[in-house]
Amino acid sequence: MSEVKKFKSALDSPVTLEVEGNINSQGVFLAVDNSTILLAPSDAPALCLAILEAVGVTRQGEDFLAGALESLQFHIEEQERATAEARERVELEAEALELFNVVREHDGEPRVATWDGFHAGTMEVYLLLARRARELAKEATK
């Protein structure tokens, strides 16, 4: 179930920020007046961090907000690292599949578009080959 949270500034602004979303949604809706944006759940920590930093909260000190800032930054960095690792894995799998298809073509076999239906060990061997090919290419450019 979705609940709308409303935030009204302590300043004399007539504008109210409405935030709506839930765990099962595709994102969080932020609405101000007649403008609405959809924020990915994964972007929420970065938005929180930006707001806290914009109002001058720093990581110095031992208060709750400084600790929250530190936790948000850690979470964001972990999320970025996981995203980069996942992207790297997808790229490496594509390179491994290309190497696999070169061998298949050499053996008179048709090319394949995915690893579906192949033993996981086969993919792992070609991932090793793709990593080594990257290393050799990097060494060759030195």
Image (cartoon, grey):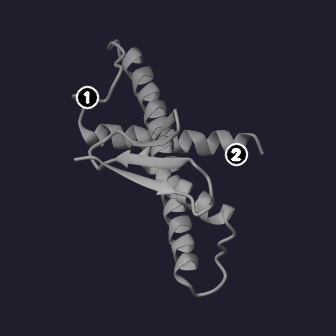
What residue is at 41 percent from the left and 29 percent from the top? 97
Residue 111 in which image quadrant: top left
What residue is at 75 percent from the left and 40 percent from the top? 141
Q: How crowded is mark 2: few (under 14 residues within 10 Å), some or many (20 or more)?
A: few
Q: Name the residue under label 2.
A: 139
Position of residue 121 in the picture relative to residue 101 (left or right): left
Q: Nearer the viewer, residue 99 or 87?
A: 87
Q: Is residue 68 above or below residue 1?
A: below
Q: Which of 12 and 78 is in front in this view?
A: 12
Q: Name the residue under label 1.
A: 116
Query: Picture coordinates of residue 135 (x, y %)?
Result: 61, 46
Q: How crowded is mark 1: few (under 14 residues within 10 Å), some or many (20 or more)?
A: few
Q: How far apart are marks 1 and 2 (CA)?
A: 32 Å
User: Of helix, strand and loop, which one carries label 2?
Assistant: helix
Q: Is residue 8 above or below residue 132?
A: below
Q: Which amino acid does label 2 sit on?
A: Glu
Instruction: Of the two numbered discs 1 and 2 on the same chain, state the one appearing first in sequence.
Output: 1
Q: Is residue 136 above or below residue 104?
A: below
Q: Is residue 67 visible to the viewer in this orientation of the structure?
A: yes
User: Of helix, strand and loop, which one carries label 1?
Assistant: loop
Q: Which of 85 and 51 is in front in this view?
A: 51
Q: Do the residues labelled 1 and 2 touch (CB within 8 Å)?
A: no
What residue is at 33 percent from the left and 12 percent from the top? 110
Q: Nearer the viewer, residue 92 or 76?
A: 76
Query: Picture coordinates of residue 59 (x, y %)?
Result: 64, 77
